[in-house]
Amino acid sequence: DAGVTQSPTHLIKTRGQQVTLRCSPKSGHDTVSWYQQALGQGPQFIFQYYEEEERQRGNFPDRFSGHQFPNYSSELNVNALLLGDSALYLCASSFGTSYNEQFFGPGTRLTVL
Amino acid sequence: QQQVKQSPQSLIVQKGGISIINCAYENTAFDYFPWYQQFPGKGPALLIAIRPDVSEKKEGRFTISFNKSAKQFSLHIMDSQPGDSATYFCAASNEGGSEKLVFGKGTKLTVNP
């Protein structure tokens, strides 16, 4: 049983560019959450998707957007990249919207030059 | 506003010793308190979690102690091993874990042989 998978593993972009990160949830999971983890910090919640809708959103600007597909996989898009967007982007999946644990993927390391 | 405060920032213990990491939260609506273990270059892995209806939960060498009135919880690692060397994050959420996780800043644990 595959866990949460993310692609790509690493990514290097320059300021102003746009990036798309991808996540496939653990088998049987239908809810996907995205987190940003800056170096030496704890993960910070970006948003959560359930039934192809954004269910919750953290304190991130509109440059951060997402999508969930009918097969429950998800994308995170970041526009107009800033140096400060350099971080490990983590995807977590869970089942439903109540009382279920979140399982994290290995993350995508984004470097903005 | 940091809603979960974690201490210490780093911890060094000898093999066989007890590692203790503490967290305090502010939001009384939180009802799920997990601990995650993260190795360099990897995503966080759920270690153990507790809900506020119990004061302690033990799984193997890992124990969570929970004090609802003080709004504090802690992780105890008994018989610490060099393989336990990692960064540990406490977190909290509503809806039993399905809502956004709010993380502490992490504790880097080093277990010396």
Image (cartoon, rainbow, N blue to C red):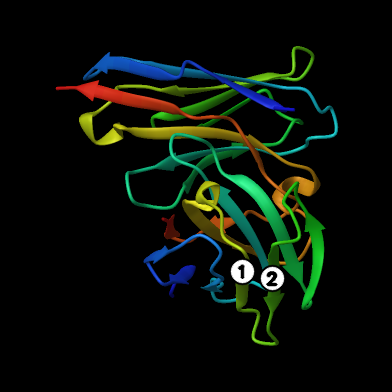
Q: Up-down: is A53 above or below B72?
A: below
Q: Position of residue A113 (x, y in %)?
A: 41, 55
Q: Up-down: is A36 above or below A49?
A: above
Q: Position of residue A77 (x, y in %)?
A: 62, 70
Q: Earlier in the sequence, mark 2 or mark 1?
A: 2
The quadrant where residue B68 appears: top right
Q: Amino acid at mark 1?
A: Leu
* Left or right of A106 in this view: A104: right
Which element carries disc 2, helix, strand or loop?
Answer: strand
Q: Chain ID for label 2?
A: A
Query: Relative to the observer, which residue lies in front, A1 or A68?
Result: A68
**Outermost residue, left direction?**
B113
Q: Residue at x 39, y 19 (%)?
A: B10
Contact, CB < 8 Å: mark 2 with mark 1? yes
Q: Up-down: is B110 above or below A3?
A: above
* Left or right of B58 in this view: B79: left
* Left or right of B27 in this view: B72: left
Which element carries disc 1, helix, strand or loop?
Answer: strand
Q: Up-down: is B26 above or below A87?
A: above
Q: Which mark is residue B27?
A: none
Where the N terminus of chain A falls, by quadrant? Answer: bottom left
Q: Amino acid at mark 2?
A: Gly
Query: Relative to the observer, which residue lies in front, B87 or A18?
Result: A18
Q: Position of residue A51 (x, y in %)?
A: 79, 77
- The 10 Å Cα crowd at callout 2, few under 14, some 14 to 19, many 20 or more, is many
Query: Which residue lies under the disc numbered 1?
Result: A76
Q: Position of residue A85 (x, y in %)?
A: 54, 52
Q: Residue at x 50, y 50 (%)?
A: A83
**Outermost residue, right direction?**
B29
The quadrant where residue A110 appears: bottom left
Query: Which residue lies under the disc numbered 2?
Result: A66
